[in-house]
Amino acid sequence: MKEKLIFIYFGDYWDERWRRRQQLAYHLSQKHEVEKVIYVELPASIPELAKSMLGIAEPGIKERWARIIKSKMRMTEGKIDIVTPFCFLSVYRYNAKWDKVFLKKITVYAIKKILKNYDSKNNLILWVSHPFAVEYIGEFGETKLCYDCTEKFSEFKEWN
């Protein structure tokens, strides 16, 4: 019997606005060949938490922080585990080195905790949809990598 696939999917926010990345993760999870999709959201930040407490945050921030605090960065919907990491500074791509190190450690820890429940030696696929997830390549013993290029990140002024 062939082992079922496990996807670690670095996507976007998992909220009520169903974007392409969420839909793709959902549809992957519905396939018979797939055992689990671990969907990693973009991280929430401490300044966003403060804005949420003041009632001026973007939609979804309150729910993401509730997942972080109440559910230890994790929520399960069917065959999808949504991991919500957090960082200290405001914008993920501009984080200080120490903040990026912290973010990577807690994200890898949360994913590996989920993977403990599965035999993922030969069936783990890392799926990334933005370039800041490149630092996670090789962290999980994945056998395949998919870069789902949906935007031309080189066109963004803030990226070098």
Image (cartoon, helix red, strand yellow):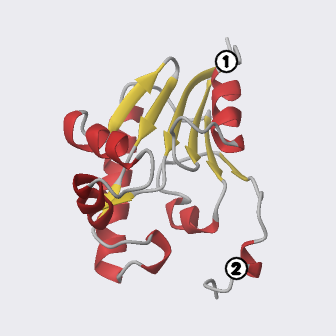
Q: Residues within 10 Å of mark 1 (few under 14, many from 20)?
A: some
The residue that disc 1 covers is 30
Q: Residue at x 53, y 57 (%)?
A: 138
* Residue 63 to residue 78: above or below: below
- Earlier-in-chain disc, 2 versus 1: 1
Horizontal side of 77 relative to 54 (left or right) equals: right
Horizontal side of 36 relative to 70 (left or right) equals: right
Horizontal side of 155 relative to 35 (left or right) equals: right
Q: Residue at x 72, y 73 (%)?
A: 153
Can you tell which quarter of the image residue 123 is in?
A: top right
Given the image, on which type of amino acid does mark 2 rest?
Answer: Phe
Q: Secondary structure at mark 2?
A: loop
* Residue 80 to residue 73: above or below: above
Q: Position of residue 146 (x, y in %)?
A: 72, 50
Q: CA distance from mark 2 to mark 1?
A: 34 Å
The residue that disc 2 covers is 156
Q: Position of residue 84 (x, y in %)?
A: 38, 46
Q: Closer to us: mark 2 or mark 1?
A: 2
Horizontal side of 138 relative to 30 (left or right) equals: left
